[in-house]
């Protein structure tokens, strides 16, 4: 057979155009509906005090941790700017991200003029700025991370507010699963009849709590991040609560459960939010969950690079597992490219390759700009490989595939009942 002639440049240009212009759903962020006021972070000072940059700055700082934390946000931002942008070239992904964002917003970064940048941001109101950032990032919907255990967030939900339809809720329940001993008394204070031991009454009260909050915030899914030690089955509160309360709740409400594996919390507590690390997860726990709960749907991302291949293999075995995102320490170009390539080669298009994890609104600009470029590069390679077999993809097919990667597959997975569930129901 002769090798078909492939116009690599034309195909790459088509893929790049489609990938850069397809609107997407950002399925996990730490951004808030504007009704939450100051909880929605944006602007240059918040960009600079992002915890990814705090961690990098402390490698150069010699001041005591507490001294840094006692400073105002502006003073912290100035120290970070000086250490990471002025005294050294800002080559790390998080530093480059600040510059890419400013550049996309039309600011001249060559001047290295922090006061001028600050002044520029003062000219914006938050409503217009959200629209601008979403436009530049090509983001259509933003999934929030909503915790009833957050004392600043909870009262806003309790008061009620007019929802901005661009912001979707996701119910975050880490304290419930990973710190049950501390959380049980809180639930008691809120009027749920729970005790520390997991009696039938306690389980049904936990479910009542989950029902209330799922309904109150109109959660699209539930979520938790788990440490590397998490195991299932296991005689731990996390495993037992997941099995007895959380998964039945998700199943009965047709909701997916997002599991984010591999974060080692507080490796260096003095760094506060920047002090968490990574550990290798036991994905046998996930294998057991997917196998034993076929009526549940799991959205999964893992933090350790070394866990990524095993996760893809698991996704080939279990259709109730949806792989998503390049999370946190894996959200750097080198690893994104590797992970995206591996996923496409092992599970094709049935995944969501990226989420932004933005904590500051403006970050959706650079995080998506950078990821889109890498996704386009890997996808173009794949379509060129196909073209070499004689299989030409049309622009419409590419558009369909990209729309699926950018939210279509996520929606299909979240909306659909599990196959096993509909099968059982259909045959009753
Ligand atoms: O990426 C981050 O900002 C981390 O601090 C975490 O919030 C992580 O994404 C998480 O959701 O636990
Ligand atoms: Zn996150």
Image: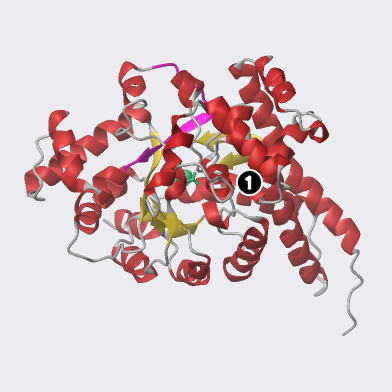
Name the image quarter holding the N terminus.
bottom right
**Region of the chain picked out in magenta, as a range:** 161-173
340 or 305, which is in the foreground? 305
Relative image position of residue 187 (x, y in whole percent): 17, 35
Name the image quarter holding the C terminus.
bottom left
- Structure colour scheme: secondary structure
Q: Quadrant of residue 109?
A: top right
Magenta-drawn stretch contains 170: yes
Magenta-drawn stretch contains 104: no
- Rendered position, 358 above or below 118: below
**7 with respect to 146 (left or right):** right
Q: Residue furthest bottom?
A: 1
Task: Using the rendered image of the protein, determine whether residue 144 is visible from the camera's viewpoint.
Answer: no
- Rendered position, 280 above or below 42: below
**359 with respect to 379 (left or right):** left
Relative image position of residue 397 (x, y in whole percent): 73, 54
- Rendered position, 358 above or below 282: above
Question: Residue placed at 78% from the left, 28% from the top?
Answer: 107
Q: Quadrant of residue 185?
A: top left
Q: Quadrant of residue 341?
A: bottom right
Question: Residue placed at 29% from the left, 34% from the top?
Answer: 149
Describe the element under mark 1 as helix, strand or loop. helix
- Rendered position, 152 above or below 10: above
**40 with respect to 380 (left or right):** left
Task: Using the rendered image of the protein, determine whether residue 34 is visible from the camera's viewpoint.
Answer: yes
Name the residue that disc number 1 marks: 94
**313 with respect to 100 (left or right):** left
8 or 83, which is in the foreground? 83
Relative image position of residue 126 (x, y in whole percent): 59, 18
Relative image position of residue 140 (x, y in whole percent): 61, 34
């Amino acid at each position: 057979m002769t090798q078909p002639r492939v116009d690599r440049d034309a195909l790459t240009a088509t893929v790049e155009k489609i990938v850069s212009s397809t609107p997407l759903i950002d399925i996990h962020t730490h951004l808030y509906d504007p009704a939450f006021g100051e909880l929605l972070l944006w602007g240059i000072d918040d960009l600079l005090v992002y915890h990814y940059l705090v961690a990098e700055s402390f490698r150069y700082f010699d001041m005591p941790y507490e001294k840094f934390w006692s400073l105002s946000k502006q003073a912290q931002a100035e120290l970070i700017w000086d250490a990471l942008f002025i005294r050294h070239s800002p080559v790390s992904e998080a530093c480059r991200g600040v510059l890419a964002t400013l550049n996309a917003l039309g600011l001249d970064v060559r001047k290295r003029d922090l006061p001028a940048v600050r002044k520029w941001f003062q000219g914006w109101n938050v409503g217009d700025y959200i629209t601008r950032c979403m436009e530049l990032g090509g983001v259509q919907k933003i999934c929030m991370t909503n915790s009833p255990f957050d004392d600043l967030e909870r009262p806003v939900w309790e008061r009620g507010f007019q929802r901005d339809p661009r912001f979707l809720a996701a119910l975050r329940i880490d304290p419930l699963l990973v710190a049950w001993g501390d959380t049980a008394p809180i639930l008691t204070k809120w009027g749920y009849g729970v005790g520390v031991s997991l009696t039938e009454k306690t389980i049904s009260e936990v479910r009542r709590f989950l029902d209330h909050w799922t309904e109150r915030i109109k959660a699209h899914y539930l979520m938790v991040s788990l440490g590397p030690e998490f195991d299932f089955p296991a005689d731990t509160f996390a495993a037992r609560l997941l099995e007895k309360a959380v998964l039945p709740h998700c199943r009965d409400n047709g909701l997916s459960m997002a599991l984010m594996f591999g974060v080692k919390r507080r490796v260096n507590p003095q760094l506060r939010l920047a002090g968490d690390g990574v550990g290798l997860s036991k994905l046998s726990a996930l294998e057991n969950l997917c196998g034993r709960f076929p009526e549940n749907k799991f959205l999964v991302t893992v933090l350790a690079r070394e866990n990524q291949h095993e996760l893809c293999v698991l996704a080939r075995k279990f259709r109730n597992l949806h792989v998503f995102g390049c999370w946190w320490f894996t959200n750097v170009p080198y690893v994104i490219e590797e992970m995206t390539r591996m996923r496409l080669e092992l599970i094709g298009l049935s995944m969501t390759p990226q989420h932004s994890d933005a904590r500051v609104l403006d970050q959706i600009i650079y995080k998506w700009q950078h990821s889109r470029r890498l996704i386009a590069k890997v996808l173009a390679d794949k379509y060129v490989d196909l073209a070499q077999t004689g299989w030409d993809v049309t622009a419409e097919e590419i558009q369909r595939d990209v729309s699926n990667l950018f939210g279509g597959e996520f929606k299909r997975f979240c909306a659909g009942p599990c196959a096993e569930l509909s099968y059982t129901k259909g045959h009753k």
